[in-house]
Image (tube, grey):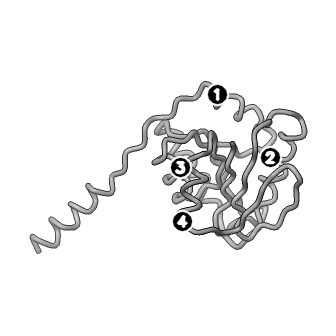
Amino acid sequence: MILVLLGTQNNSFTRLLDAVQENINNGTINDEVIVQSGFTKYESKDMRFFSLIDKEEFDKIQSQADLIICHGGVGSIVSSLKKGKKVIVVPRLKRYGEHVNSHQIQIARKFKQDGYVKYVINLKHLGKVINEMKNFNPKKYESKENEIIKLVENYIDNN
């Protein structure tokens, strides 16, 4: 199963869903596709949609996914990596009215440079990257959250 995460940004991200649909139509995607669409309105007989659901149900669906294709939001990326998922990041871009700026490109690049994900800017290449994911072994994600908490606690204790 492929899970597509568009996040909760209030701008539409139909560009990604058009590319997913194209890859269903051409046979690159044969799996079930579930989409967390947020505020993006889209219709397809080939994908199952939910806008927002409770955390427990979301975690269950995310855990079942074989591949996650998501926008460049840190929360979507990190929660997927924590579950050991293969992730393709597709940044929302300002030029398409998908976000207020194109900062998600930098986020995607950093996660790719660190070996965690693959990313796609030009959606003509989505099918190629989906096929590459079969042989992609992402680096295991290790959260630095506990280290940050300790730094803050040490700072508070010593000041």
Label 4: how many Cα within 10 Å (few below 14, some 14–19, many 20+): few
Residue at image coords 90%, 40%: 25
x, y percent for residue 12: 77, 67
Locate the C terminus and report the quarter of the image it occupies: bottom left
Number of the label disc, if any, that sits on residue 80:
3
Tell me which label, 2 or 1, sits earlier in the chain.
Answer: 2
The Cα–Cα distance between marks 2 and 1, rounded to whole angstroms, is: 17 Å
Residue flagged by tag 3: what amino acid is it? Ser
Q: Nearer the viewer, residue 38 or 16?
A: 38
The three-letter code of the residue at mark 4 reads Lys
**Residue at the left extreme, as displayed:** 158
Q: Earlier in the sequence, mark 1 or mark 4?
A: 4
Secondary structure under tag 2 reads helix
Residue placed under numbered mark 1 in the picture: 134
Residue drawn at x 56%, y 56% as measured from the top left: 76
Instruction: Give the structural element (helix, strand or loop) at label 4.
Output: helix
Residue for badge 4? 55
